[in-house]
Amino acid sequence: EAGVVQSPRYKIIEKKQPVAFWCNPISGHNTLYWYRQNLGQGPELLIRYENEEAVDDSQLPKDRFSAERLKGVDSTLKIQPAELGDSAVYLCASSAVGRQVSDTQYFGPGTRLTVL
Amino acid sequence: AQKITQTQPGMFVQEKEAVTLDCTYDTSDPSYGLFWYKQPSSGEMIFLIYQGSYDQQNATEGRYSLNFQKARKSANLVISASQLGDSAMYFCAMREIQAAGNKLTFGGGTRVLVKP
């Protein structure tokens, strides 16, 4: 069974440029998560989807970040415009159900973003 | 207050020896889950082991075991017979159903380096 797929793996952009990350979750997983991981820290949740619905986007900086999951499968996270402080690893994860405390999240390899 | 605390930023362990990674947590939610993930230098978060707050026995998965002390709010990971491939960052995480909107909160991580 294929794991969570993310692309690109690495991205280097100039500040003020737009950038987009793509994620394809594990087949059959209806819950999808985007996390941001700053250097030397644990991941922090940006947004969580259950099917097409964003059920928790309280940590998403909505002035410059947006996300979508149009058909309840793959998802795109966008930053426009990027700032120097956005340099981080962006991780996508998926889980089968999303509402049980035991529901395990499986992560993709992440996209390492560098903003110059 | 930190929800998840990992007090060991880094540690060395001799190959074939056991190592214990500390994790303490803070919650008032009666139902919660505790997870450990491994993050090698490649960046992917790999799920290792899960412990539910109502589980009577400590979780085990191969060489990984979780020393769960509910009254002390600790969930230490024990890796037995360390291998060179165990060198990585290790993150403890907690999922609370009620208090935190069902999201996964991570600690700051512990870096483990296995010496041959």
Image (tube, rainbow, N blue to C red):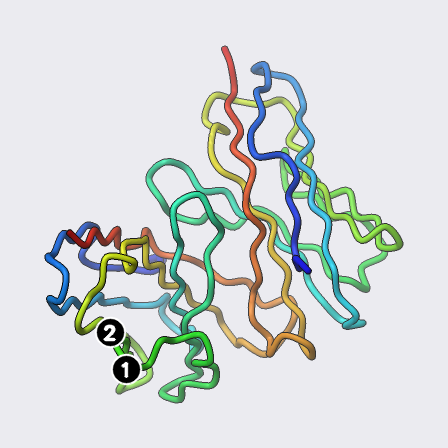
- For the N terminus of chain B, the quadrant is bottom right
Q: Quadrant of residue B52?
A: bottom right
The Cα atoms of the two marked residues, 2 and 1, are separated by 6 Å
Q: For numbered disc 2, what is the local secondary structure?
A: strand
In the displayed structure, A83 sits above or below B81; it is below
Q: In percent of the image, x 46 and y 67: which residue is there?
A: A45
Q: Which of B37 and B58 is in front in this view?
A: B37
Q: Do the residues labelled 2 and 1 touch (CB within 8 Å)?
A: yes
Rendered location of residue A110, percent (x, y): 31, 54
Mark 2 / mark 1, whichever is N-terminal:
1
Q: Categorize mark 1 by other alpha carbons within 10 Å: few (<14), some (14-19), many (20+).
A: some
Disc on res. A76: 2
Rendered location of residue A54, percent (x, y): 41, 85
Q: In percent of the image, x 72 and y 42: which residue is there?
A: B76
Residues at discs 2 and 1 both on one chain: yes
In the displayed structure, B33 sits above or below B74; it is below
Rendered location of residue A86, percent (x, y): 28, 60
Q: For numbered disc 1, what is the local secondary structure?
A: strand
Disc on res. B11: none
Q: In this view, does A107 lie to the left or right of B1?
A: left
Q: In percent of the image, x 69 and y 34: which residue is there?
A: B78
**Residue type, label 1:** Glu
Chain of the residue where label 2 is placed in the rendered structure: A
Residue holding disc 1: A68
In the displayed structure, A37 sits above or below A61; it is above
**Residue type, label 2:** Thr
